[in-house]
Image: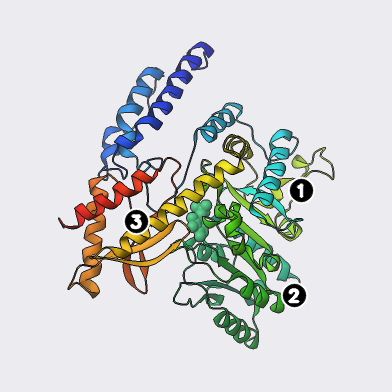
Amino acid sequence: MTDSGAFRRHAHEVADWIADYFEEVEGFPVRSQAQPGDLLAALPSSAPEQPEPMERILADFRQLIPPGMTHWQHPSFFAFFPANSSPPSVLAEMLTAGMAAQCMLWETSPAANEMEARMMEWLQELLGLPGGWRGVIQDSASGATLCAMLAARERERENTVVDRLAFYTSDEANSSVHKGARIAGFPLDCIRSIDTDEHQAMKPDALAKAIKADRAAGLTPACVVITLGTTGTGAMDPLAEIGEICRRENVYLHVDAAWAGSALILPEYRRLLNGIEYADSFVFNPHKWMFTNFDCSAHFLRDPESLQRSLSINPVYLQNTSDEQITEYRDFGISLGRRFRALKLWFVIRSFGAEGLREKIRSHIEWTRELAGEIDAAEDYELVTGPNLALITWRYAPEGASGAALDELNERLLQAINDDGRLYLTRGSVNGRMVIRFSIGQTRTEARHVRSAWKTIKKIAVTI
Ligand SMILES: *Cc1c(COP(=O)(O)O)cnc(C)c1O
């Protein structure tokens, strides 16, 4: 197992497998057709006592694993939001695994630390985020948003106790926001879901009212999390209006742009950042729509010190030689241990170039607009929301079907599409009614995949 000649041989074989996978992934059903328990039944119930040859392990991998996977790198993956990779990103991940460094301190990995600093500066500039903010790579948007809430809590701690702190987000916020608020210790009866308007965006006046009521009741409004590009429909909470309220009320504002943030590299979408000067932090996921392997979440903070104050613990065994100039990222996140995540960003951004990234994201948005037009014009179909960047929601609505029967019909259609395997879509809900989401953004998607997906949908719809 530690024989370097054998490792070299197997590594070449694995590289070939990955290259073949990229070429052949289109041939797999996108959503795994596995049944619950399929893999469990194929795996021995106990660990082997004796070493097994890598040949056998790799053969079992080839036979058992791909059929049990949903293929996120399939060009007809239109479900959820993408979790992309790309060849440069995979190469960087292989190198990261090879060095297997634990990057908790500058001293344990100086290049990883400084690469992270520079990549966050690159992204800050590419997205047009305010200068002077500090970036850090987190494992996920969930983790970054939780950290933002901890920073918000820390800011208020001098003034009040945690069980008086109130938290606000919209009823369309990602589930991770509500979960984070609980973990950060906001009392359950002080976590507010603010109403949204007909575009699923948070209503600023409803927020202002809730803050006022909470103050009157003796609570301290501490944190607002808004979303640019909600998971359900891609809705944009009004940053500038809400930002003004937060500034006036002295409430911490965090912007969750997990998916939509990538589109900010397009100058024509910069306006989405109007009002960012009011925010305290911002997160987006290069691992969603910037062709970088999971996990890689870019978190930017105006005042990193409030987070550091909340998380910094400096026992003797972590004291080291680094100097003032160096940021110790362990004080920016939950875990002590850190992966070298910046390397894949360096590979991806250099390999695509900013223009290459823009071109890809721009075409995803363009194809979404075209598809939205087709659906809107089609007799038996209804475009429900969007296009918001590269996401639409729609439903099959043949004459005569309505209410719960229509929901049920769309549920059946969605299931039939995903069982068919040529494309993969997921559901949403708008005004309490079932919709089907169509999200374009996979690294390998081309216009032909979108067009053929639409044809497939229409063909399947008439058979259900
Ligand atoms: C995907 C998503 C998240 C969660 O991202 P993770 O990196 O998986 O934690 C949070 N917010 C929004 C708006 C998302 O779309």
- Nearest to N terminus: mark 1 or mark 3: 1
**Label 2: how many residues lie within 10 Å, few (<14), some (14-19) or many (20+)?**
few
In the rendered image, residue 25, in percent from the top left (x then y), is placed at 35, 35
Disc 1 is placed on an element classified as loop
In this rendering, the answer to whether 319 lies above or below 260 is: above
Q: CA distance from mark 3 to mark 2?
A: 45 Å
Amino acid found under the numbered disc labelled 3: Thr
Badge number at residue 314: 1
Check disc 2 and report the residue beneath it: 159
Disc 3 is placed on an element classified as strand
Q: Which quadrant of the rendered structure holds the C terminus?
A: bottom left
Q: CA distance from mark 1 to mark 3?
A: 45 Å
**Ligand 1 within 8 Å, label 1 CB:** no
Question: Can you tell which of label 1 and label 2 is closer to the viewer?
Answer: 2
Check disc 3 and report the residue beneath it: 426
Amino acid found under the numbered disc labelled 2: Asn
The answer to which quarter of the image holds residue 118 is: top right
Amino acid found under the numbered disc labelled 1: Asn
Q: Residue at x 55, y 54 (%)?
A: 263
* Residue 158 in view: yes
The answer to which quarter of the image holds residue 300 is: bottom right
Left or right position of 236 against 241: left
Q: Residue at x 31, y 31 (%)?
A: 64
- Nearest to N terminus: mark 3 or mark 2: 2
